[in-house]
Image (tube, grey):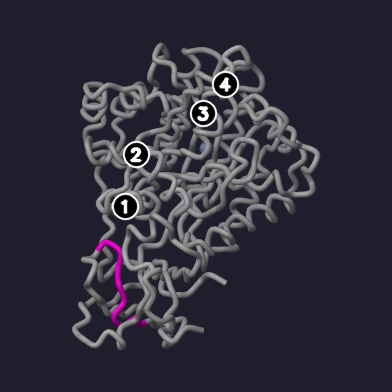
Amino acid sequence: MDASHRSADTAMDFEGVRIAGKPDQSRWNIHCENGLVGTLTEHESTNDSQADPRLLCPSLCHPHIHLDKCFLLSHPRYADLEIQKGDFQEALSLTNEAKSRFTHEDLMERGRALIEESIGFGVTHMRAFVEVDAVVQLKCLDAGVALKEEFKQRCYVQICVFAQDPIFSYDDKGIQMQGLLRQAVDRPGVEAFGSTPYVEKSKENQSRNIQWTLELALERQLHVDFHMDYNLDPKTDVYTLLALKAAKTLEWPKDRCSKQFRTIVFGHCTRLSLFTKAQWQSLRQEIADLPVSFVGLPTSDIFMMGRPDKEAGGSERVRGTLQVVQMIGEYGLNAAMGINNVGNAFTPQGSCDPLALACLGVGIYQAGTKAEAEILLQCVSTRAKSAIGLGSPDLELQAGQSADFVVFGNATSTESFRRRNSTKDLVYDAGHERVTVFRGRKVSQ
Ligand SMILES: [Zn+2]
């Protein structure tokens, strides 16, 4: 047990730690009590040996993760479902086959592994997508709600009922989908509802999907989360704009302080990466004060997109992903980054570590400066939490906040130039020495 724990359940103190988002040379004393940051004061001592050499940053958040279809590629139950081609169609059919075999125990085992590994990396909050459709019915939701309860002392799991299948594009199944989804969103513990308009078979049904999803979310007071505009075709309509118009017409609540406040999230949205500056500005105007956030899913986007046909001989491998750092910096939008899938045919590669995603962001967004590192850290912590309706996007740790953070480094380690001292150290290469604190208690194993 580390020395800073006075009493694991009631209080936790740090003396002279560094804090991400504060000036590099400053050191801080923090006292946490009853799950909150009680006091936060600057550490005055000039004697460095008395200061705690560790670095604190806000805890991490998955704004978008599929709890039910994780680790299909490593679980023996699905060993026969190997990737042969690696394209979207195959991912869909392998995953559909896997879904037909889901059992409660299996969903619990894989979901538990995902949450446990995430906590180990510093995650204390997540929006977990659970699918509802004619095949799995409410099985994934049952497991999701059970896992939310199982982990409630260690991680906040926000359940998002998710329609991966069309809601309108086939007759009898469509009607069944609507009934199942209505049943699902009424389950205690469900806080968000999401759909995938682009799987509908016509433009008209895409629009109906969007309208129906927004109406149901509004009626049941749920956050709404769309998998949207997942293409790189300049000729396609931009459904994000259509959804914004529909939200406005429905008078979606905007007041952050009201009890009805819920957020609207758009994930993927690779089509928007083709926007001109004028189109971005007009999108910004269209959003106005609606509580909209975008979630970039770069690990999935770059794996799934831009597969050339054989004739092209390896060229024409165009890929795109939301340019989240620029969206924040230039257009004042809220954007975050999500892992989306872990260990399945949609995204075979990568771990549950949101900082690995921030690290990828340095390369993919060509965002290497100190200021950009701060934004990238926000994208996997405070901005991600804000997207799912929790708190402000600022990195700033303040007294009165929930004591949710990650402690990097070792309290007893000696001075080394490789010690992580700043936000950019974490984003370039976070290292593995981490302790996760949720509501003032150490929660990682
Ligand atoms: Zn997704």
Q: Is residue 330 left or right of residue 191?
A: left
- SS at mark 2? helix
Q: How many marks?
A: 4
In the foreground, 200 or 22? 22
| Alpha-carbon span between mark 2 and mark 4 | 28 Å
Q: Which residue is mark 2?
A: 324
Residue named by callout 1: 373
Marking on residue 314: 4
Q: Is residue 370 above or below residue 78?
A: below
Question: Of circles 1 and 4, which is in front?
Answer: 4
Residue 159 coordinates in the image, percent (x, y): 52, 48
Label of residue 196 in the image: 3
Magenta-colored span: 13-21
Mark-to-mark CA distance, 2 and 1:
12 Å
Task: Please name the amino acid that badge 4 sits on.
Answer: Gly
Q: Residues within 10 Å of mark 2 (few under 14, many from 20)?
A: many
Q: Amino acid at mark 3?
A: Thr
